[in-house]
Amino acid sequence: MDKFVVEGGYPLEGEVEVSGSKNAALPIMAATLLAPGKYRIFNVPRLRDVRTMAHLLRIIGAKVDIADHTLEIDTTLADFPEAPYELVRTMRASIYVLGPLLARFGRARVSLPGGCAWGPRPVDLHIKGMQKLGAEIDLDYGYINARSKQLTGAHIALDVASVGATGNIMMAATLAEGTTVIENAAMEPEIVNLGEFLQKMGARIHGLGTRRISIEGVPGLRPANFEVIPDRIEAGTFLVAGLITGGRITLRQAQPEHLSEVLSKLEEAGAQLSIDGSTIHLKANRPIRATHVTTAVYPGFPTDMQAQWIALMSLADGSSVVTDAIFPDRFTHVPELNRFGADIVVKNNSAFIRGVSALKGAPVTSTDLRASASLVLAALAAEGHSEVYRVYHIDRGYERIEEKLQKLGARIRREASELPY
Ligand code: UD1
């Protein structure tokens, strides 16, 4: 297994291109199961999670070719509506095939994802949504078994504005008989992007990007070609890298309007920003100012940027509080950040961070995707030598992160770890 070796303490300078969004690409790939035929999906990030979803589509019977950043998917012969445990346990987003499989084949067998590194992450809203659309569901041997001859439109009010449940229900509802209304729907740009792809396939969807999405079912959909939006979390992570190292960076191919809350927090924390179309320039001012953050559903501050923000705040001039209102247990990075000399205490779903004047290099271990990103950020800012273990987590969601960071002048390299983890 690989590790990153980092010599920290150098400001990042230069330009970096934002890749396509992982969280948009994954449901879009699943949506190709809705209609048999050939699809081309552009601006797809080259990531482990994308390869995992491609593998899942192949198990189902689709042909998937990945060339550079374009996916060619042919779902004509897809005929095995099952997502096995071995795969789902490595990537929760596999649950996205539930809705499309059920809608196209009238049945689906999808492993329950189970928990993740920072706690339970239920899929009850996905299941209830399918039931509301008329599916019969039973749980057996850790699998969701879903059946329905013909899904029918329904009024579904989500208890929580879940990204995944909104996407899954929206996909299933495209082929249902009648109209489905999702209240308290997710407004995340990735769900809008998925909805636009479905519209291109012939789906009738209204209210994308609002709390109320309505889907008028159609008898059939057709294949389409589509471009994935830029990854706002990757963009935000690089901007934090610029600020935490006291650097000056330019992000190309970003979508600044998807980052408004992150950009305003970065400015509050001392970044000087200028935006020109899809380009964002960041110049770091010192000191980093202590800036509280509470995560929220879009357009609020994303939970997927919480770990990176805590890394940044560990070097701020003063104390700050970072609260995660979406995933209350998502703090496995905190003990590792403290190994760099950070002063962070977690109580309930908040991290209380007392800024320190410097971090010192250390060996640390990644526990999940965004936690790994925060450790890499801290290592880049820390004085001296760091090693970040288990970087396979970061490869799930960041395309060639060490190469992009090297282009910005970071002294980071990937090495095979001599440890068995
Ligand atoms: C997606 C993102 C993930 C991001 C999260 C929140 C993908 C592949 N992943 O995950 O990176 O951190 O949105 O922005 O897009 N919940 C339930 N029951 C359910 C589903 C969710 O109670 O059936 C709860 C969760 O426990 C959590 C909240 O709803 O507290 C939000 O989760 P959700 O939006 O569903 O996250 P994901 O779609 O899994």
Image (spheres, rainbow, N blue to C red):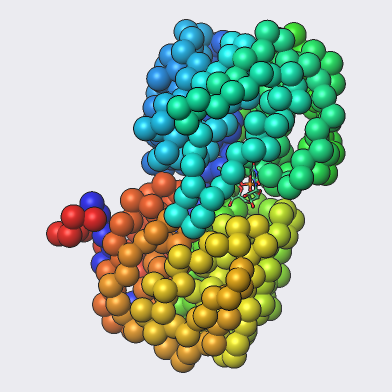
Nearer to me, 297 or 200? 297
Count of numbered circles on the image: 0
How far across and how far down the image is residue 28, in percent? 58, 30
Query: Splitting the image into 4 quarters, where does residue 155 fall?
Result: top right
How far across and how far down the image is residue 71, in percent? 47, 27
Query: Splitting the image into 4 quarters, where does residue 9 fall?
Result: bottom left
Residue 115 left/right relative to 201? left
Residue at the left extreme of this rendering: 418
Residue depicted at 38% across the width and 52% down the height: 393
Residue 5 left/right relative to 107? left
Query: Splitting the image into 4 quarters, where does residue 300 fall?
Result: bottom right
Residue depicted at 56% across the width and 70% down the height: 309
Nearer to me, 213 or 15? 213
**Does 368 appear above or below 85?**
below
Residue depicted at 62% across the width and 15% down the height: 147
Residue 416 left/right relative to 22? left
**Does 197 appear above or below 249?**
above
How far across and how far down the image is residue 242, in percent? 50, 71
**Does 225 appear above or below 124?**
above
Residue 209, visible in the rendered structure: no
Residue 294, visible in the rendered structure: yes
Q: Name the image quarter holding the C terminus.
A: bottom left
Residue depicted at 57% across the width and 65% down the height: 306
Nearer to me, 380 or 331? 331
How far across and how far down the image is residue 42, in percent? 53, 32
